[in-house]
Amino acid sequence: MRFNLTLDNYIRYGYSVGMTTAPSTPPLTPAVFHILLALSNGERHGYGIMKQVEADSQGKVSMGAGTLYGSLKRMLDAGLVKESDKRVDPEMDDERRIYYQITGVGAKALAAELDRYKRIVSLAQEKKLFPKTYGV
Amino acid sequence: MVYESTVRTLYKRLIALYPQGFREQLGESMEQTFNDLCNEKQQTKQALLGFVLWTFIETALGIFREHLLLISSGVIMQTILKTLGSPVLVSLLLIFPFMIMEVVNRRNFNEDFPFMLFFVLWLNLFAISLILLPIVRGRWTGNHDMANPVPTQGNTLLTNPRSALMISVVLILSVIILSLLDSLGWEPLERLLNGPNPEQLSVFGVRVASQFIAIVLLSIPVVAGIIAGGPIVSTLRAGGSLFAHPINLIIVVLISFLFAAGVVSLIVDQWPCFVGVPNCD
């Protein structure tokens, strides 16, 4: 229930989607999806999230600070992520950084989104829409 | 090195333009991320200028979006809608005696009711009420509700006295510049306002009626007055002085005075008609 409420609230605050979907699992925006994916295997600071998003998308998605933190604000409000403690990154300089971590709600939202992608891929396979089926 | 520190300082100032809540929650983290990105560019000896330009533009768009979300999310929008009701009523009540005079004194002249005249009269009074009523209400709230003060809104571009002042000055300047260009006979503006076919104008390929453009132009000083008055209202609600923001107050008074002058000149001009003088214009 909380999951639905927070997501509804999250959508109301700027991430409305242009298509009708089941209210329980509204699709995530690409920015939110990539941030959740970047945080799925551990806490990261802002710069770390940017770099992970770049790596996950093989350099195809480059997120600016305005987009990253605008999305993080909405995600924090919706309870998809939370601020973790402030600490030094051993791989960087000795400045203490704010880390962000995915919450249970965030993990569920990511799982629902991945499930949606999986279903779409299955559908595409059923319809033989992949380039291989055309002999490319 | 100097260039880099200047860029970092400028970015810090840019972040300060985010709404207060956003800035307090994420400002520090944003600054750190920007510094990390600058360090990365420095270490990899990549060109900084392109990155800085892109980041500043992208962040500026983010700032705009956050302010827009704050406005549309409720507080300010609700206040605006709540504030519209009283000015509509007050301005209607103020023109009502003149409408009665018109109907009663000109009933024998077999003339059409001058809707346009009363609309313009109402519009001017509406503009004055829209600017001044929130201040009057704020003063009343400040005097009577001190035991339960109104909670302060988040610090946005529109509630911050300095930025509100700047926005209203820019709006007023735009009206002054347009008036100057009009008086100098600037052709595009002349064409926009006066023809060749003023009823069917095309702005960026969209056909717009000239009356609509006139109302839009008229609304600019009203918006400037409301924005300049915003911090005064907040201060009054918090129990502060009416003169806490003197320049904002001067702008509000000046704009209200201009609209009031319009009302007075219209009434003086039309007074013979109101009292039933035949063949008046």
Image (cartoon, coloured by chain):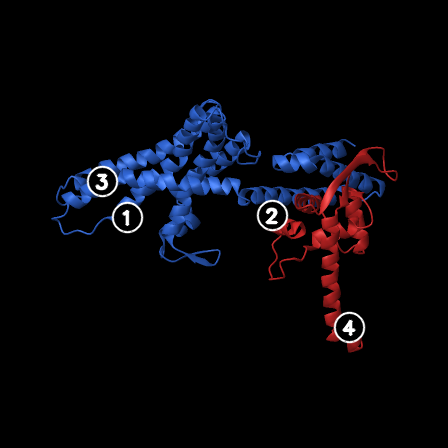
Chain colours: A red, B blue
In the image, A129 versus B3, the foreground residue is A129
Q: Residues within 10 Å of mark 3 (few under 14, many from 20)?
A: some
Protein chain holding label 1: B
Q: Circles 1 and 4: CB distance less than 8 Å?
A: no
Q: Circles 2 and 4: CB distance less than 8 Å?
A: no
Tell me the distance, in whole angstroms, between the alpha carbons under discs 2 and 1.
42 Å
- Sooner in the amino-acid sequence: mark 3 or mark 1: 3
Protein chain holding label 2: A
Tell me the distance, in whole angstroms, between the alpha carbons under discs 4 and 3.
76 Å
- The quadrant where residue B139 appears: top left
Q: Is residue B150 above or below residue A120?
A: above
**Are tags 2 and 1 found on a single chain?**
no
The residue indicated by pointer 3 is B98
Q: Residues within 10 Å of mark 4 (few under 14, many from 20)?
A: few
The residue indicated by pointer 4 is A131
Amino acid under disc 3: Phe
Tell me the distance, in whole angstroms, between the alpha carbons under discs 3 and 2.
47 Å
Viewer-nearest of discs 2 and 4: 2
Quadrant of image for the C terminus of chain B: top left
